[in-house]
Image (spheres, rainbow, N blue to C red):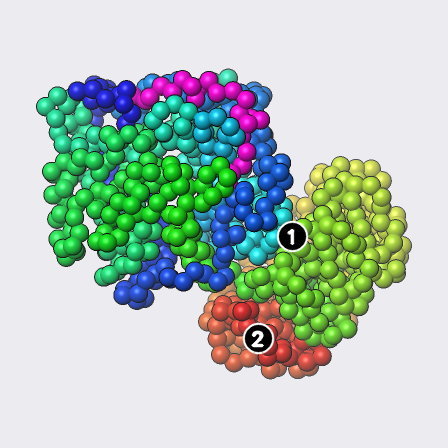
């Protein structure tokens, strides 16, 4: 509450006359704040050991402050680069461009829409009208676009919803450079990029921030710029740009001001919206967890009837709020100071919240507590046998959860016997120079680090293998030559949490890893690896493609044929290296390319306008690409390309599959074997072309097919009812022998055999090649993996069964359970457990034996 609003009858609170007759159900609430990952973390830890501290006294060795905050003035931070990459103008532009505004506006207009709200002296929350302090100096501020700099970036992954609805908040703080102090905090609520996985869908977000902690400040700033403004791909998951209109609007995140120009010091909250003119604007919103201070105060003789009525409803809900404040003591018998400070909230329903929170003593909820509320607190304390606690301590907790309390009023107040609320940095938690408050460095950041480490260890893959392995190439891209990379045949390479690389297998083909850390992704040819750092620099090792990589940085993704790499820069320019027979020369000049595709020995690059440029072996599609524009995606066999237009028409070129493509339109996806293509029509009928020995003819009659799978020489098509039809492979690679019946859900392949899962987890296999026989009986299997001549099946308990060629890993799979994922090269498998331990089997010359020094991710 501010000074100008004080009067004897609390005139600042005016209920509409209708509010007095609102039903109890409309006003009443209970706890409205959502449960978050910090709640889960503290509950899980104290449930396992109620007498232990959930938040360890020693700081996390895995999660440094670099993964939680990026602040100007910190060692290694280039303030000028920070100012450029995170300018206020850039942030406002992103918000405007991502809105559904029908009328254009400028950054200045958008910012002024926020400032104008300081001229408003009355706002309604539900049926309640509340006075606001008119702050004319702040309403008339000018030149802020050029006079505000980024102060800090905060990772609030700890605020991720327990149910996985969102993945926390990511905040950019700005400060006014001169004159009276003025801050803006843009607090984006981040959508879950994989919502079907619940809170585990936030794993890629968590891993992104863990990786940020291992980078130099320069590299970290590059990645943070992408995360906040463009979005990026991480671990195969597309992460959207954090700064987006929808991430600050009603029901999501918010923008908050922390202002010192007028007096007293004050915080307010805003949402993005579209005004009546169709322009993107900011509108004032209630400040969350900031109930009217009058609701806590003793009743006065001159209180209005409306205030008395609202107090009745608040008192009825107050017991639930006290439960929220006493959450640490309800979770554990003797919670530590860390657990208490980080473990409670107020969670008031929004209709009790006001529109401003300031340093005025009369706005302090702990200043004067009504006897009936004290009685509710005392009863709760007695029920928990907390004889050393007082009602004043719990009211101090309530104030600490308000903006004014957390930023100043609650500094050093007692919230439990001999436990005080930590100190801010004089009304802020990070000042204009980037200095962090003691509350952050001693309490909040260590707690957030402990949570992030716990979540990361439970959900994020501890080993991040090369982008494409033998299994994924065979099964995840609709054909062996459709992946962006050719899988390494002879070795494994994987990233650790710190971005260092571990490799094993044939030493000449990539089995010896480079030193250093900070790598973010690994790519491959058939006998080499290439690793990308956050700054876009490239390191290579191995045989074909293992030398000759470009110097410099700025590369964003790497593609490959069997023996050459092509790297794409952010401007769409392409650089190639590797074996001259496989596309290491002839790359196009210029920029604007968005993606690169490949056959065994040639590349095809697509521009944003849908035009195509090719190079490499002319017999493998390195010549003969169609002219014109409008192509959206390219598919490949070993020696030919097929390009799809937005209208569903197809053009093909190259050797096997390069002629005979169907005319017409409406095709949506193309599948391939080594030498033939197949495409589904909208009615589920199939058309194929290419070498007849590889499935180019012999397609099944009829319609209703929903997906096509392939191995080297045959196709297998699945219907919605789970029935299967196969064709191709004159060499017996699965063109015959498919199981009859229905209920099959997914098909997997080796070089020349298929295996299929039913809904009950039972397996059938066919084909004359290795793996076509010997499938395990029984059910309960959840996924099948493969290399060239063997399959392995994983059960829900993480146990593994293998079959196929014994020299390729068809025997020798580890006993026991707990495995979560399996990777493969041509003749070996590696299985990973949730704790990061790994086991390999198959041909030892191909990585089937792991050196004992690298059997865990630690």
Above or below residue 293? Residue 780 is below
Instruction: Please tell me whether mark 1 sits on a helix, a strand or a loop.
Output: loop
Camera-nearest label, 1 or 2:
1
Which residue matches tag 1?
Answer: 534
**Which quarter of the rendered picture does the N terminus lie within?**
top left
- Magenta span contains residue 642: no
- Give how far apart the Cα atoms at labels 1 and 2 are: 26 Å
Quick check: can you spot residue 711?
no
- Magenta span contains residue 151: yes
Left or right: 545 with respect to 240? right
- Contact flag, marks 1 and 2 (Cβ < 8 Å): no
Of residues 311 and 198, the one nearer the viewer is: 311
Q: Quadrant of residue 854?
A: bottom right
Residue 855: which disc?
2
Of residues 769 and 559, the one nearer the viewer is: 559
Q: Residue at x 30, y 35 (%)?
A: 290
**Which quarter of the rendered picture does the C terminus lie within?**
bottom right
Q: Residue at x 50, y 17 (%)?
A: 277
Q: Quadrant of residue 561?
A: bottom right
Rendered location of residue 76, percent (x, y): 59, 49
Rendered location of residue 424, percent (x, y): 37, 42
Left or right: 692 with respect to 808? right
Q: Residue at x 61, y 82 (%)?
A: 811
Density class for disc 1 (Cα within 10 Å; few <14, some 14-19, many ≥20) is many
The magenta span reads: 129-152
Quick check: can you spot residue 77?
yes
Query: Which badge, 1 or 2, is on the more N-terminal residue?
Result: 1
Left or right: 623 with respect to 558? right
Of residues 198 and 524, the one nearer the viewer is: 524
Q: Residue at x 24, y 30 (%)?
A: 362
Rendered location of residue 129, percent (x, y): 28, 22
């Amino acid at each position: 509450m501010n000074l100008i609003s004080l009067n004897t009858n609390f005139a600042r609170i005016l209920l509409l006359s209708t509010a007095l007759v609102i039903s109890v159900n409309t006003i009443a609430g209970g706890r409205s704040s959502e449960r978050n990952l910090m709640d889960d973390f503290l509950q899980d830890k104290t449930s396992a050991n109620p007498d232990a501290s959930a938040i360890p006294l020693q700081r996390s060795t895995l999660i440094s402050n670099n993964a939680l905050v990026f602040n100007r003035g910190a060692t290694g931070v280039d303030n000028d680069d920070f100012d450029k990459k995170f300018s206020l103008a850039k942030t406002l532009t992103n918000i405007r461009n991502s809105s559904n505004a029908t009328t254009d506006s400028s950054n200045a207009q958008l910012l002024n829409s926020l400032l104008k709200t300081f001229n408003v002296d009355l706002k309604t929350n539900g049926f309640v009208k509340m006075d606001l302090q008119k702050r004319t100096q702040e309403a008339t501020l000018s030149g802020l676009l050029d006079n505000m700099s980024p102060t800090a970036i905060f990772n609030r992954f700890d605020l991720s919803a327990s149910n996985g609805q969102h993945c926390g908040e990511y905040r950019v703080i700005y400060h006014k450079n001169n004159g009276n102090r003025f801050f803006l905090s843009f607090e984006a609520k981040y959508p879950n990029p994989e919502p079907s996985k619940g809170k585990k869908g936030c794993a890629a977000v968590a891993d992104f921030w863990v990786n940020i902690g291992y980078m130099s400040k320069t590299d970290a700033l590059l990645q943070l710029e992408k995360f906040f403004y463009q979005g990026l791909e991480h671990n195969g998951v597309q992460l959207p740009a954090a700064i987006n209109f929808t991430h600050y609007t009603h029901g999501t995140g918010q923008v908050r001001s922390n202002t010192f120009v007028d007096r007293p010091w004050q915080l307010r909250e805003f949402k993005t919206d579209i005004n009546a003119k169709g322009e993107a604007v900011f509108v004032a919103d209630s400040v969350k967890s900031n109930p009217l201070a009058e609701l806590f105060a003793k009743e006065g003789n001159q209180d209005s009837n409306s205030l008395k009525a609202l107090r009745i409803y608040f008192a009825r809900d107050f017991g639930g709020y006290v439960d929220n404040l006493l959450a640490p003591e309800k979770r554990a018998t003797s919670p530590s100071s860390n657990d208490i400070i980080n473990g409670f909230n107020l969670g008031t329903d929004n209709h009790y919240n006001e529109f401003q929170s300031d340093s005025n003593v009369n706005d302090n909820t702990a200043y004067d507590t009504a006897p009936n509320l004290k009685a509710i607190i005392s009863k709760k304390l007695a029920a928990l046998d907390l004889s050393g606690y007082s009602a004043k301590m719990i009211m101090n907790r309530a104030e600490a959860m308000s903006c004014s309390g957390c930023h100043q009023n609650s500094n050093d107040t007692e919230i439990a016997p001999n436990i005080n609320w930590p100190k801010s940095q004089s009304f802020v938690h990070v000042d204009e120079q980037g200095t962090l408050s003691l509350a952050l460095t001693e309490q909040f950041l260590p707690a957030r680090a402990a949570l992030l480490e716990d979540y990361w260890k439970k959900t994020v893959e501890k080993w991040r293998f090369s982008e494409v392995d033998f299994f994924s190439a065979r099964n995840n891209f609709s054909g062996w030559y459709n992946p962006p990379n050719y899988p390494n045949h002879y070795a494994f390479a994987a990233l650790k949490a710190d971005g260092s690389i571990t490799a094993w297998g044939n030493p000449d083909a990539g089995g010896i890893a480079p030193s250093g850390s900070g790598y973010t992704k690994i790519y491959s040819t058939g006998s080499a690896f290439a690793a990308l750092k956050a700054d876009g620099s490239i390191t290579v090792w191995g045989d074909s493609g293992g030398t000759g990589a470009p110097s410099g940085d700025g590369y964003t993704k790497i593609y490959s044929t069997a023996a050459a790499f092509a790297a794409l820069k952010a401007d769409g320019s392409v650089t190639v290296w590797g074996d001259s027979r496989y596309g290491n020369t002839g790359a196009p000049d210029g920029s604007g390319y968005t993606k690169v595709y490949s056959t065994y020995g040639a590349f095809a690059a697509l521009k944003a306008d849908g035009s195509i440029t090719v190079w490499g072996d002319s017999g493998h599609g390195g010549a003969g690409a169609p002219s014109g524009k409008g192509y959206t995606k390219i598919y490949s066999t070993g020696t030919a390309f097929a390009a799809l237009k937005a209208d569903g028409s197809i053009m093909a070129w190259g050797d096997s599959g390069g002629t005979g493509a169907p005319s017409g339109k409406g095709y949506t996806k193309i599948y391939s074997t080594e030498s033939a293509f197949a495409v589904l029509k909208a009615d589920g009928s199939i058309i194929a072309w290419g070498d007849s020995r590889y499935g180019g003819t012999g397609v099944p009659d009829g319609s209703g097919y929903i997906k096509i799978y392939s191995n080297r020489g045959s196709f297998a098509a699945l219907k919605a009812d789970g029935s299967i039809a196969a064709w191709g492979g004159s060499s017996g690679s699965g063109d015959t022998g498919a199981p009859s019946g229905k209920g099959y859900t997914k098909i997997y392949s080796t070089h020349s055999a298929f295996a299929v899962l039913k809904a009950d987890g039972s397996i059938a296999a066919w084909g004359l090649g290795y793996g076509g026989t010997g499938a395990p009986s029984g059910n309960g299997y959840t996924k099948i993996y493969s290399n060239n001549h063997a399959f392995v099946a994983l059960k829900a308990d993480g146990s593994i069964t293998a079959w196929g060629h014994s020299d390729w890993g068809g025997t020798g799979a580890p006993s026991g359970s707990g495995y979560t994922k399996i990777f493969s090269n041509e003749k070996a498998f590696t299985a990973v457990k949730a704790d990061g331990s790994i086991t390999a089997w198959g041909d030892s010359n191909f990585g089937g034996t792991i050196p004992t020094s690298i059997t865990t991710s630690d």
